[in-house]
Amino acid sequence: MRRWAWWVAVAAMSLAGVACAAVPTQPEAGHYATRADVRAFAADTAKSTGIPLAQIQQWLDAAQYQPSIIAAMTRPAESKTWGEYRPIFITPKRIEAGVDFWNEHAAALSQAAERYGVDAQTIVAIVGVETFFGQRMGNYRLIDALATLGFDYPKRGAFFRGQLKDLFVLAQKEHLDLNEARGSYAGAMGMPQFIPSSYLAYAVDGNGDGRADLFHSDADVFASVANYFAEHGWVNHAPVAFEVTLDARQQAAVAGQLNSGRDLKPKLTAGALRQLGIALPKDLFLPDTEKLMLFTLTDGDKVAYWVGLNNFYVITRYNYSVLYAMAVWQLGKAIQAARQAQLSAGTGAAQ
């Protein structure tokens, strides 16, 4: 998805090891609208949104249970180690594609970056991680995904029923054909993979045509991603993260204060790390009161300690995962470096 932007909620709620036994018996496909719980949801949605009940029932009657969606929710990529996760996203092929994508859309990216104060490399990296620059936007019908998770995934049913309601509002507002609209197994959509609530809250019209189209309009996509980051407190050109070295005593002192899983809100301060004798970069001005994230990344037998600053935390608001945030940041840096080298050699598009 908040990803979500969409990924915003999916990784946060798709923890490894979810017991399949919690999933009820598979419902009969295509008969959601006849279930008592679904009828009650439809009536409540019609009342709260003003969408005709008949329209909501028609959408729900077309929805089909998809067991593969339930299975996918139990094995998210974010359950991997950094050593397993990084090679999925930081690859020569994706970096090269990112340079080409940036060159092709340089003007629109620059416009979004200037308007919202979010650098182009971060916008490009989000699109690169989420959908390989628009090439992989998902093959599940959104109505199937959100009905399956809303009514037959008890662990997060309430959340996904809320997303389903927002999908109906979005369909009315943006004229989506819910018989055809497709996205991820968790209901995220478009090039940046916004879940419905994020689409409604943060998608903006970037090309002036009066719509926020995250499926077909590059300008809308770039502006919407930038708007999402700006609304969550991104500070342009500010540092994002850095690695630190901790000895055994320091590791023991911070053991209970590390950020992981869904616990990603900064808990430590620069002053607290200094008091422990942890060396921070001298070229960064970090007041003692600066709140920081401290987390580990595992690659084989190596465990590295990292500090995430405000901008790193903002990336996790798109998808609640330090792995995701690190992949976005590193991919963005790699694309920017490769593009700069290309431009310096005179073989790329003009800036």
Image (cartoon, rainbow, N blue to C red):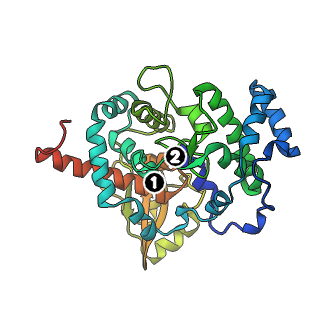
Q: Nearer the viewer, residue 33 or 38?
A: 33
Quadrant housing residue 220: top left
> Whole-percent x and y of residue 228?
49, 37
Please, what is the three-letter code of the amino acid marked with disc 2? Tyr
In the image, which disc is placed on residue 152?
A: none
Label 1 sits on residue: 325
As helix, strand or loop, the secondary structure at mark 2 comes to helix
Alpha carbons under labels 2 and 1: distance apart? 8 Å
Which residue is located at x 35 percent, y 33 percent? 113
**Residue lying farthest right?**
36
Q: Is residue 20 left or right of residue 15?
A: right
> Whole-percent x and y of residue 148?
71, 51
Q: Earlier in the sequence, mark 2 or mark 1?
A: 2
Q: Is residue 288 visible from the viewing direction of this image? A: no
Q: Is residue 72 left or right of residue 119?
A: right
Picture layout, residue 323 above or below residue 48 = below
Q: Is residue 313 visible from the viewing direction of this image? A: yes
Which residue is located at x 54 percent, y 33 percent? 202
Which residue is located at x 41 percent, y 57 percent? 327
